[in-house]
Amino acid sequence: MKLTRAELNYLALPGLIALIVILAGIGTVLVTESFLQSATADLDRAKAERSAIQMKLIHATDEEREIRASLVDYQRMRQRGIIGAEHRLDWVDAVKNVKNELGIYDIRYAINAQGPLQYPGLKNPPGVQFLDSRMKIDSDLLHEGDLFNMLAAFRNRLAPYVIVRSCAMKRDPAARPDTYGPHVQAHCDLDLVTIQDSGEHDK
């Protein structure tokens, strides 16, 4: 079928309109896809930001709990006497009480002058210094269990934090197995650790 010029002229305007409509439709689809991609990216960014905020809130809550726990521990250590100046007279009374309560035959001890705590890799945090008063103990014991009970009592009764650096036990060669009395001699070196905080002033 062959169209005449008059028919072609008649169809030109509708054809042009149809072409414009098709192009507009294609443009609309492209623009819609672009908006959809942009909206998806914005949604992903919003989710990521929300997750980051939630993580920050979780970390902030955890840090707050840790700070509160640290403050409680700090107050407990200060009340016990780990933080602050050493009180040797109180230590002497504590050792005497341990000896009497546990029925230890004899405890001979000496506490060296206070100095910096010496441990490999130990570094003092800013404003805080770990101090050590080395305590040397020689004790006559009924049996080996007395030593463990005595060390546990020292940890509970002495104000400083007690670290057992070394201990040695030996049977008393003069002790008779058929008699009641001390059969074991023990020698221990203990670190009595206190903390000096430059941000606090002892009253």
Image (cartoon, grey):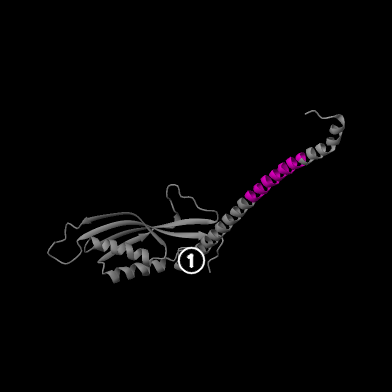
Q: Quadrant of residue 159?
A: bottom left
Tell me the residue at 42%/50% (across/down): 119
- Residue 107, image quadrant: bottom left
Q: Position of residue 54 (x, y in %)?
A: 58, 56
Q: Can you give x and y, in whole percent of width and height, for residue 203 in the image?
A: 53, 69
* Left or right, residue 41 beside residue 106: right
Which residue shows up at 86% across the image and 29% down it? Answer: 5
Q: Using the image as rendered, state which of residue 95 and residue 59 is in the foreground.
A: 59
- Which of 111/154 is in front? 154
Q: Is residue 140 left or right of residue 129?
A: left
Compared with 152, 34 (above or below) is: above
Task: Work out whether residue 112 can be spotted.
Answer: no
Tell me if I can see residue 187 in this picture: yes
- The residue labelled by disc 1 is 78
Local crowd size for mark 1, using a 10 Å CA cut-off: few (<14), some (14–19), many (≥20): some
Which of the image's four quarters has the N terminus?
top right
Q: Quadrant of residue 100?
A: bottom left
Query: Tag 1's secondary structure?
Result: helix
Residue furthest toward the top?
2
Question: Would you say the magenta stretch is mainly helix, strand or loop?
Answer: helix
Residue at image position (65%, 47%) is: 41
Q: Give me the residue at 24% from left, 58% from top.
A: 185
Q: Which residues are magenta?
A: 22-45
Q: Mark 1: which amino acid? A: Arg
